[in-house]
Image (cartoon, grey):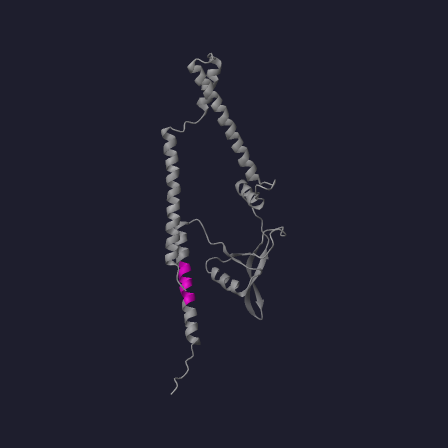
Amino acid sequence: MKAPARDTQPQRSLYSYAHAVARRRFKSKQNKLIRQVFPKYDLLGWYSIGTHPTESDMAVHKQILNHNESPLFIQLNPLINPSLAKDLPLHVYESVVDLVDGSNTHKFAKQKYKIETGEAERIALDHVATASNQDSDRGSTLIANLTTQRNAIKMLHSRIQILKAYVRDVENGTIPRDHELMRQIASICQRLPAMNSTEFQQKILSDYNDILLGSYLAAITKGASAINEPRN
């Protein structure tokens, strides 16, 4: 006798529902933890990749509505040729509610945006956009600034070496002592920071410990997130 066929569709539906509930509970718990660490921050929206919004994006967006009444959706388009594009390959959307066939329907509405950048961000982006190699004469603003600082440091080092050689020759009696010049050298030495002072050592040790602590916390957070991430 053949065993009766079983309908597995309800089991798949039950699994999908349970998986979705588990994901929502995980996200809710994660948002609570983030709010405890960053109480002044709020969830503004989310992002994805693609050429245009899809129904799947709207389904995720509706879940974000539980945490923010008007979240933003940023979609990055990886298919745009960066050499031909004039603007950044991203679009910003907000959800609007339209009345379709007598029922409220959520739709994405494209919004205009303006990017505000600081000087450091502008230099970094310019360096990434116009990064040069050894075979090219083109260079970014970052390379030019670093080259200028390097040349200034080299010049300062060479001038200090000249002053050290002069003081050494005066002490050895090779050249006569010029008191006016020695006073100027003493004035320059007083302007230079003392790198071996106790205050400097404490400051650099404090900064070093802060950087190590930040690295350790980042590693712990990454490991905890990987452990708590539910497996499909």
The majority secondary structure of the magenta stretch comes to helix
Where residue 140 sits in the image (x, y, percent)? 58, 41
Q: Is residue 153 magenta?
A: no
- Extreme residue toward the top, this view: 176
Left or right for 171, reference 73: left
Which residue is at 51% across, 29% downward? 154
Which residue is at 48% across, 18% downward? 184
Q: Nearer the viewer, residue 61 or 204?
A: 204
Where residue 216 sits in the image (x, y, percent)? 37, 46
Evaluate whether residue 187 shows in this view. no
Left or right for 127, reference 231: right
As drawn, 220 above or below 20: above
Which residue is at 48% across, 59% downward? 64
Q: Nearer the viewer, residue 152 or 88?
A: 152
Which span of residues is magenta-colored? 19-28
Left or right for 31, reference 141: left
Q: Which quadrant does the C terminus fall into?
A: bottom left
Q: Nearer the viewer, residue 147 or 31?
A: 147
Evaluate whether residue 162 shows in this view. yes
Q: Nearer the viewer, residue 126 or 73?
A: 126
- The answer to which image quadrant residue 135 occupies is top right
Q: Which quadrant does the N terminus fall into?
A: bottom left
Which residue is at 42% across, 59% downward? 27
Where residue 75 sits in the image (x, y, percent)? 55, 57
Number of numbered discs on residues = 0
As drawn, 149 above or below 129: above
- Extreme residue toward the bottom, this view: 1
Where residue 186 sits in the image (x, y, percent)? 45, 19
